[in-house]
Amino acid sequence: MAAKNSRHFDPFITYISGGLTVAFVAVSIIAPDRMEAWINSAFSWTTTNLGWLYIGSVFSLAVACLMMMFGPWGAQKLGESSPEYSNFMWFGMLFGSAIAAGIAFWGPAEPIYHYQTVPPFFSAAPETPQAAVAAMTQSFFHWGLSVWAIYVMLAIPLAHAAFNKNLPLRFSTAFYYLLGDRIFGRLGKIIDIFAVIATLGGLATTTGLTALQVASGFKFQFGLDLGPNGGYLIIALFTAVFAFAVFTGLEKGVKLMNRINLYLFIGVFLFIFAFGPKLFFLELGLQSVGEYLSSFISMSLFTQPGEDKAWLGGWTVFYWAWWMSWAPFVSIFVARVSKGRSVKALVMACMLLPSLANFLWYTVVGGAGIYFNIGDVLAAHGLETAIFGLIRHYPLTSAMGVIVMALVAMLFLTSANSASVSLAMFVSGLEHPHRLLSAFWAVSLGAVALVLCGAGNLKSIQTASILTAVPMIFLLIMAQVSAFKGLKPPRRQDEKKS
């Protein structure tokens, strides 16, 4: 193993990843048109030529997780100590770490979009009962088992190597069973650099989406137009808040926000269900779950051969890339809070249960959007206004507008805070990195988001995840191999002796 570094950061990882980030921001400011043209060209090439790789690799991750859960690997523990958190708190932390404001953005927006423009996998006519089932099934697929498999399959070898082999809790540790002590050398540092770049792209995407949603909420819900610079102002404010949080180390505040997030999430869900068309929710949800389960394999391998890949790139490939770019920092967080749990428990708590929670959320929030047919709102004001167009059909609209804005902001701030600290962990190798290092990465995250937001459209923001997640495809495949190689089923010596 490498000797411990007395510095607060690893120079190789920090200077290269930080330099690449600064260079990207600088070039985007100096030559924005040229950078946007390059990004759009790279986006088109990636979705056309590598879409199949995103799709195939994510399906393999889902299969591998189920094998881990139901096979002999499931009984193995991640460390010998007892779990630190109750089951309820543990699940809440796992769910909150990976969802962020995305579920508030896409929850009502995606189903109504697919209801009006039916995905190519289905043959239903738009705005029919069959289209409603197709829209909900497609949303379940994008937020179901496959999503969580990306995090789980990376967290398992990371947690096992960290807690069973007493290795540092850093991203490259997930590849110990495949690469051995080489993770402590230059190869491990390069892997951690990829983790930094992917995380920046993924969180910048979330920051941009959140800024669009908050700005649209002020305008649509309260009539307050922030103008062309509204996105910049919101990102700058958010960046200042989570940079201050990581600099001061307000851990108690972050834990409190996690708890509040969970309560707000449940509260909004129950409100929309209680005052909405309950029978419609139940029928739509049950039929869509059945369609999802029966079509899971064919949907997972749907690649549109010989056809235009615009839809696939804008939806499924975007989602898989987005989740992949979140995987480095989410997997470290999942590993940290899962010490003492079994592999089977981890798969259940971080793959099956969150999928169920997402299905419930989409059934109610997305189902309400379909029932009230808020498509005219999306057409006039964009996808980012979906949640606010929905609550106009409910009582206490103004109060709910404030609550939804709070939910969006706090979900995002909690994830951004965790991501900033994780970025500092990647470049330092320390479980508790220096606060200045965490603050630097918080500001860097905001700067990248500002550059992307400058393009002013959803496609440019989505592109960040797709491009920065390309290396993660190969790293996740390596993580699968590392997991199965390191977590070898225990030999049945007692049976052999008998």
Image (spheres, rainbow, N blue to C red):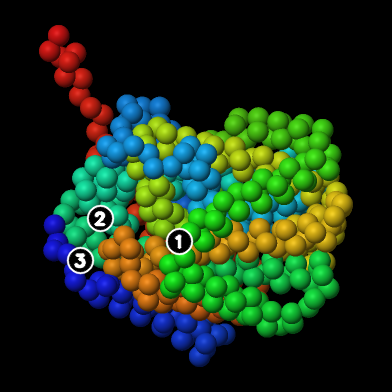
Q: Nearer the viewer, residue 275 or 308?
A: 275
Q: CA distance from mark 3 to mark 2?
A: 16 Å
Mark 2 packing: few (<14 Cα in 10 Å), some, or many (20+)? some
Q: Nearer the viewer, residue 400 or 373?
A: 400
| Amino acid carrying mark 2 in the image | Pro
Give the vertical position of 58 relative to 10 (above or below). Answer: above
Give the vertical position of 71 relative to 139 (above or below). Answer: above
| Amino acid carrying mark 3 in the image | Arg
Mark 1 secondary-structure assignment: helix
* Residue at 21%, 48% in the rendered image: 166
* Residue at 32%, 46% in the rendered image: 159
Q: Earlier in the sequence, mark 1 or mark 2?
A: 2
Q: CA distance from mark 1 to mark 2?
A: 21 Å
Task: Report whether 437 appears left or right of 104.
Answer: left
Residue 290's disc is none
> Which is in the foreground here, disc 3 or disc 2?
2
Q: Nearer the viewer, residue 478 or 391?
A: 391
Q: CA distance from mark 1 to mark 3?
A: 32 Å
Residue 168's disc is 2
Mark 1 packing: few (<14 Cα in 10 Å), some, or many (20+)? few
Q: Give the labeled residue for mark 1.
A: 251
- Mark 1 near mark 2, Cβ–Cβ under 8 Å? no
Mark 3 secondary-structure assignment: helix
Residue 186's disc is 3
Query: Where residue 126 sits in the image (x, y, percent)?
Result: 80, 47
